[in-house]
Amino acid sequence: MAWRRAFWLAGVGRVVVWGALLGVLAGCQPQANVAGYWLSRWLGTQPPPVSAAAPGALAGAVYTPSGQPIAGATVLVAQPDGVPHVTQTGPDGSYRLAGVPPGEYVPAAVAPGYAESALSGLLGLPKLIVVHSQETAVVPPLVLAPYQPAPLPAELAAAVQLRQTGFYTAAADFPAGAAADVRSYAFDDAGATVDTVRLYLPRGQAVEQRLPLLLMVYPSPVDNWETVSVGFAAEHFAVLAISPVAARGVDAEAHAQDARVVLAAAQQGAFPAVDASRVLALGGSFSSAILARLLRSASGELAGWVTVGGLANAFSAAHDFYMARITIPPPYTWLVPALGPPNLYPLAFLMYSPVYVAGELPPTLVIHTAADEILRIEQAYALAQAVQAAGVAVTTHYYEDASHYLGVGENLTDAGREMFYAIVEFARQTGGNP
């Protein structure tokens, strides 16, 4: 099976998966958000209106639950059309955010080592702050609790009933002669059966010999990406792949927890021929939202990560959506409005914006193309700039004339070939040589 077919099947799979995910929204707040979006389109108020009056400002402070100031926290508000206004707190935890158009906003904040938080009031509902032209609105204190991933059992494989469900061999056209032994796995956790786990090893690999681990987080059914996984396995890596299960709906945090279970199981020796001491994580497109959450919970356990055509700032992506600068395939089209207005529900966007916690990220490889019509290349520029500013090693590969997946197919382009070997080289540098 050729890589072109793999990517075409991945697109079909995304239609099925995300169509199912959107179906579970009925009766929930996201469905109401989508209905509100359609109503505003009918009324002619899309894109969301933003005041043209002279801007105002917000001022406040960020503290820990015990009342200690947090220096260097990112504080932001977003316009209804997604444009974020961002600042950082000073040594005493205080901030002043200027240049904000008049309107209603819910301030939010995050800091390395701390969970995202938005200003809330009675019953935990979002608390609105009104910004008036040429005035400074005083914001009640924002409180950030330390970020604490959900604990995992010491004997994880047994606790989640990790089990092998199949074994077969697979081949790929690229690289030439690529083949792999494939083991299918499933486990049960948090009320769902996750049966989208695959381990790809070079054909005939001795299980006693440990190989560096590539953890692939795919945006659609894992089997649709098989030739990609086989290609990397043929370069003498252990490729542990996972994709979303419909039972998790649109909860990227839950999908990330599934990936974290797989990573932790590998670290505990649950998979043959896997050296999980230095792990490289890979994702892209819509799975980058899942990867963003995984990076928060397991960044200290990863030697590096790769994002291909990925999301870096969900606020600016929302702005691109509302401004019709991107063309999102129909199954995904309503995911942005499903999150709600960015000015009122900033947490839903902040959670999927790794640019604001770049200091937590491991060494980073960013790949993107200017021809991408789903997530613009500005996402890559913003991520690379934030990572570099945070003092984290970053490598970039930008292209001009390839598709969202850089034209990797049966008629392999130079860009696709270069992308593949750039990832291989980065994996060997960060995760270790086979």
Image (cartoon, rainbow, N blue to C red):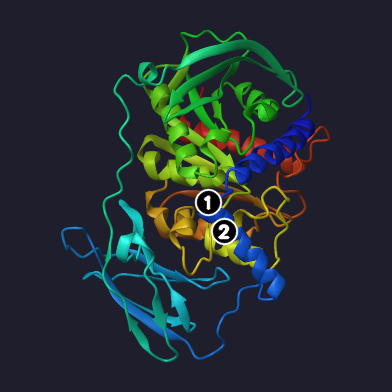
Q: Residues within 10 Å of mark 2 (few under 14, many from 20)?
A: some
Give the camera-side residue of 340 and 424. 340
Q: Is residue 24 left or right of residue 89?
A: right
Q: Is residue 127 visible?
A: yes
CB within 8 Å, label 2 to label 1: yes
Residue placed at 55% from the left, 54% from the top? 30
Label 2 amino acid? Answer: Ala
Crowd tier of the residue under label 1, counting other residues whose Cα lies within 10 Å: few below 14, some 14–19, many 20 or above: few
The type of residue carrying mark 1 is: Cys
User: Which residue is identified by label 1?
Assistant: 28
Q: Distance from label 2 to label 1 (Cα)?
A: 7 Å
Give the percent coordinates (x, y) of residue 68.
Answer: 17, 62
Q: Residue at x 37, y 35 (%)?
A: 301
> Where is residue 17 drawn, in percent x and y?
65, 38
Q: Quadrant of residue 423?
A: top right
Quadrant in which the N terminus is drawn: top right
Above/below status of 91 relative to 110 = below
Q: Residue at x 77, y 36 (%)?
A: 8
Seen from the viewer's position, the closer of residues 413 and 184 is 184
Quarter assignment of residue 76: bottom left
Where does residue 62 sit, x and y in percent of width and height? 27, 67
Query: Label 2's element?
Result: helix
Horizontal relation, residue 255 to residue 225: left or right: left
Residue assigned mark 2: 32
